[in-house]
Image: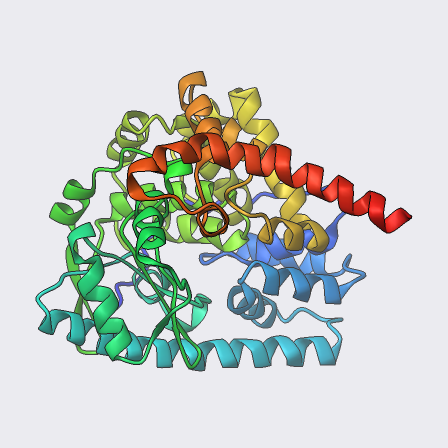
Amino acid sequence: MLRMIPPRQTHVATRLSPLLPERDAEASLLFLASRVHFSAEVDDQVVALARKVGDWTKVATLGELHRVQPLLYRTLKRCGVEGIPARTFRALKGQVAITSMRNEAAVVELARLQRSLDDQGERILHYKGATVALRFYGALSLRTFHDMDFLIETTAIGVVCDVLERLGYTNSEHLSERELELHQSEQKEFLFQKRGFNVEPHWKFTPRRFDFDVDYAGIWRRALFIEVADEKLLVPATEDVLVLMMLVGAAGFWKRLQMLADIAAVTNGPGPVDWATVEAEMKRLRATRVLYVATLLASELCGADVPESILVAARQASAVARMADQVIRTMADPELCRANAELVPWRFQRLLWGMRDGWRDRLIYLFRTITTPTPLHTRRMPLPGFLAAFYVLLVPLHDYLLMPAVNVFRGNRAQR
């Protein structure tokens, strides 16, 4: 396993955030208890909030939806919180035990995958899951992960897919050759599955609809090795990890609290963060709003150690404050969380629109969102490669004219 360095002594926000939902002890408790790093002040606030909780089922449900059960359980146990229904606490404890066993099995499988790809001479970059848990959480069991994500080079897509299939994995996308070409151009990953294991090889970090000019060559160049299960795994440098977490969290419209806990874990981790480098890269990517939303939320909810200059700028931007409030209100409500998790990325999202820095970037996002074909489009409207440009016209006609007309026709028939 990776030899862990004790977390450095650093600032951990302890006050109750003004962004926490008022009169919602359940959500506020979850946010405060789901911190990787803690302090006596935080523990006292957890105990005080726990006394106000009237619905422990909601706390447990939110913990599961946000994939932070291990952190929640650890905090409740450490603080000796009273009043938790025995059944709820046992269920939470059982979920954490299952997560720990699943994570251990996933690490063994990950090492096996690494060896198989090494044999083919293909390098892969691990940037989520087990490596984040070990590098920044301090223990494999503290972070829930359902997928094994890694970055591959675009030239290696075919080889990596062949290796995974030889190892018994099945690609969840059953695509024709033409659909495969479009998928690789417009999307960012495949999902391979085998007996409870999910593997996601990425050739990009964000899809074309919400794309950024990521310095992939630089990320590969700055990468370093860590040892996991007797295998050396290549991982991004700390500053690159932060940038990627922010971009991926934004592209996923901050659907889980875990996305923010990850950022806090990095900022409060064993080594210092070069924030000047992070700021400069986010500015180059035209992702300053993403930086502000991510750091404001991670600091206020998860105690991330963020320079005050960044937080001041984030708080002064009214659009950022509105987006942060929207994210928190969604995270605090189990039904909104479920609805958010089911949003399809190829539909226009106001939050994604708002996180783009300028009108040019927003209009590009809008154009790509309403014109990019999905496998559904390519199957219903198959075009040869030399006519693929016509999807720019066919996709919006299908989504915003044909399908609404069909739905109206079906509704009228059903009323007869």
Residue 261, how many percent across, how many down?
Answer: 47, 53
Which residue is the extreme one toward the right?
416
Q: Residue at x 68, y 38 (%)?
A: 404
Instruction: Say whether residue 380 is visible.
Output: yes
In the picture, measured across the screen, residue 173 lies left or right of residue 113, that is: right
- Residue drawn 25% across and 66% down? 161
Residue 280 at x, y = what percent? Answer: 27, 28
Residue drawn where x is 44% and y is 65% of the image: 143
Quick one: 231 or 303, which is closer to the camera?
A: 231
Q: Position of residue 342 (x, y in %)?
A: 60, 53
Q: Is residue 325 visible?
A: no
Picture mark count: 0
In this view, which residue lies farthest toward the top?
Answer: 359
- In the image, residue 104 sits, relative to residue 288, either above or below, namely below
Q: Is residue 125 above or below residue 242?
A: below
- Image position of 308 with respect to 207: above or below: above
Q: In the picture provided, is 74 more to the left or to the right than 414? A: left
Q: Quadrant of the N terminus?
A: bottom left
- Residues 200 and 416: in front is 416
Snapshot quadrant of residue 356: top left
